[in-house]
Structure formats: C-alpha cells, structure tokens
Image (tube, rainbow, N blue to C red):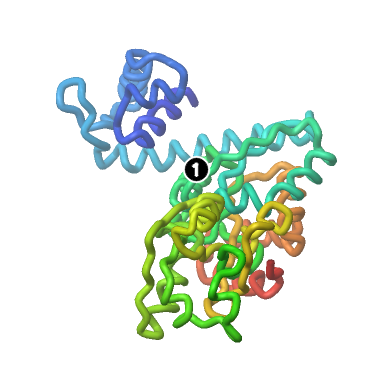
Amino acid sequence: MKLRQLQYVTEVVKNGMNVTAAAEKLFTSQPGVSSQIKRLEEELGVTIFERSGKHINGLTPEGELLVQRFELILNEADNVKRIAEDFSHPDSGMLSIATTHTQARYVLPPVITEFRKRYPKVQLQINQGTPEQIASLTDSGQADIGIATEALELFDNLILLPCYRWNRCIIVPKGHDLLSEHELSLAAIAKHPVITYTFGVADRSVINRAFTKQGLDLNVVLMAADAEVIKTYVRNDLGIGICARMAYDKSQDQDLAVLDAGHLFDSSVTSLAIRKNAVLREYVYEFIQLFASHLNKGVVDQALKAHNDTSLQDKLYQEFVKEADTL
C-alpha cells in the first residue's frame, strides 16, 4: 500500500467520482489512476468503489470507512513533512490562504506586507472565493488557512478562531439626499434602490434581517460579491451601496460619500479556520497573530487540543470573541 494510491482514491472522491478530473488535478493519466486503485483494492482484498463497467458510481460501505482512514493517513503524512520542514527549513515554505475579495483587498495587505518582511522566503498564495469555496479549500487541505465571515461553521473538520468584528456602511454619490438625514434610518434607506452583496457573501442575511424586523422592503437592484463592483454601480447612479465599512477607502473613493450604518445592523465576526489535527509551521502561527493579535500560539494550540470536544470548542470560541477587535 502506497501513499500515492491513497491519494488517488481520495482525489477521485473529492472530484465527484470523476477519475479523469482527479488525474488532471494530480498531473497524471486517467489509466494510471484507475490501475493504481485496482492494485490497491486487490492488495486489501476489498472493493472500494461501486462500478458500472468502467464508470464509478460511488463508494462501497467498506470504501466509505477506508476513505476516512486514508484521509487521516494522508493528513498525518503532511503533518510529518511540516514538522521536518520546520527543523530543516524554518524560514521557507508555502502558505496558502483562502479568503474573500473583501479580506484580500482591504484587510490583508498590511498583514502580508509585514509577514513578507519577516519571512521573505515563504511563498504566499491567495485563493479568492465565496465563503463556501473558502471552507471547502481549507477542509480539503488545499489552503492552510481560511478567512471568511460565514459558511466556515458548516464544515465539521474545521476549527474556527474569531478575528474581528465589523459592520456596514452606506455609500452614496456626493450630494445624495441621504446625506441630509439628521439620523440615518432603515426607513430612509428603503426609499432608494440598493446595491449590495449577493447571498452567502459578507453575511448578507444580517442586512435582510434588519429590514424584515422593521417590516420594510429592501429594493435590491443589483447584487455582487465584490465591494468594488458595488461602488462602481453607485458611481453610475444605479442606486446606493450597502457594504462592509472597511471597503470604503478615503484615498480611492474621494468621489463618494460614506454614512456609518453600524447602529442599524448587527455586527458580524470574521473568523479564521484551520483544520483539526493540523500541524502548523511556526510562520503560520506568526501570520495568524499578525492578522488577529489576540490569537497567539498558545491560544491557537488551545483550540487545536480541544478539536474533539465540541462544547469546549464553542466555549473557547466565545472567549476568543471577547478579545476580538472591531474594525
């Protein structure tokens, strides 16, 4: 039994039982993957996949159990490599981060700049996507760290570390009627066409919940996953923008005006996710603390040790939330 064979099996599962797609991800041939899986089944004396001719339909019951073990073995093999690399090459390696456009554009630049000063030999990779994509990349090990405001909690294999609280603002063209409001209200906002985030991005449900609670209809004329897109259409007078407060840049958005809306919406918490049982390189610990100063190595290790105790994880999460800053 070889690690490569286990990797072939798990990659086929990750790709929806598509052997060709798995082979492409592994930079090998489809016949090679099929052949190695067959050899593994023969060696173990069990059938891992249910087949119709050459087509794989799914996992057999024994295959379901084996794949769980394969994933643990492959994860531990990766951990062994990380431990060895920390001794042999402590200042070099790769750090893969999965995050949203908002984090990549507005929050991460100073963190990454400082990290690069400390670890110039570490290669950084930023994968942008929806919260669901971010969680999936982190859960599968394709990303070392996932940063998002929602969806991370849907994956049982992830540990969540709360980083900071944030809220929303209203972005309008200069001279807009809303700027003359004595105190901004949801009722005043509801009179205008709105451009905001698509569902599943930047905790959009918080916006809808606030209007529904007051019995107000929200006239959303355009939805986008990117705050820059929202601002572009505000500039084109398509409507007013509701987006993360951090997305307003004084130097870049001088042609727009911003109204704080923190009193109108519940605040949201952005979290950082790491896999349970992960062994983190020393520079990963340092990156995490650069991103959220209260998440030092001791705190992260405490969360990792509690990975099998859901109630303790929840308790720690609430404790860490209290330490999180507000942006």
Depth check, front residue: 220 or 28: 220
Reply above or below: 305 against 142.
below
Give the residue at x 35% y 76%: 217
Rendering coords of residue 232 (x, y %): 53, 51
The image quarter containing residue 75 is: top right
Q: Which residue is mark 1?
A: 137
Depth check, front residue: 31 or 176: 176
Depth check, front residue: 69 or 255: 255
Q: Is residue 174 left or right of residue 28?
A: right
The image quarter containing residue 156 is: bottom left
Farthest residue, direction left: 52
Rendering coords of residue 82 (x, y %): 67, 36
Give the residue at x 79% y 39%: 116
Reply above or below: 12 against 327.
above
Q: Is residue 276 visible?
A: no
Quadrant location of the N terminus in the rendered image: top left
Quadrant location of the C terminus in the rendered image: bottom right
Reply above or below: 41 against 133.
above
Give the residue at x 37% y 69%: 219
Q: Is residue 269 left or right of residue 214?
A: right
Give the residue at x 34% y 27%: 44
Q: Is residue 155 left or right of residue 125?
A: left
Rendering coords of residue 278 (x, y %): 60, 46
Farthest residue, direction right: 117
The image quarter containing residue 305 is: bottom right
Total of numbered circles in the picture? Answer: 1
Rendering coords of residue 7 (x, y %): 45, 28
Secondary structure beneath disc 1? helix
Reply above or below: 318 against 304.
below
Depth check, front residue: 291 or 68: 291
Please rate how many residues cluster around mark 1, counting C-alpha atoms within 10 Å: few if below 14, some from 14 to 19, many from 20.
many
Residue type, mark 1 in image: Leu
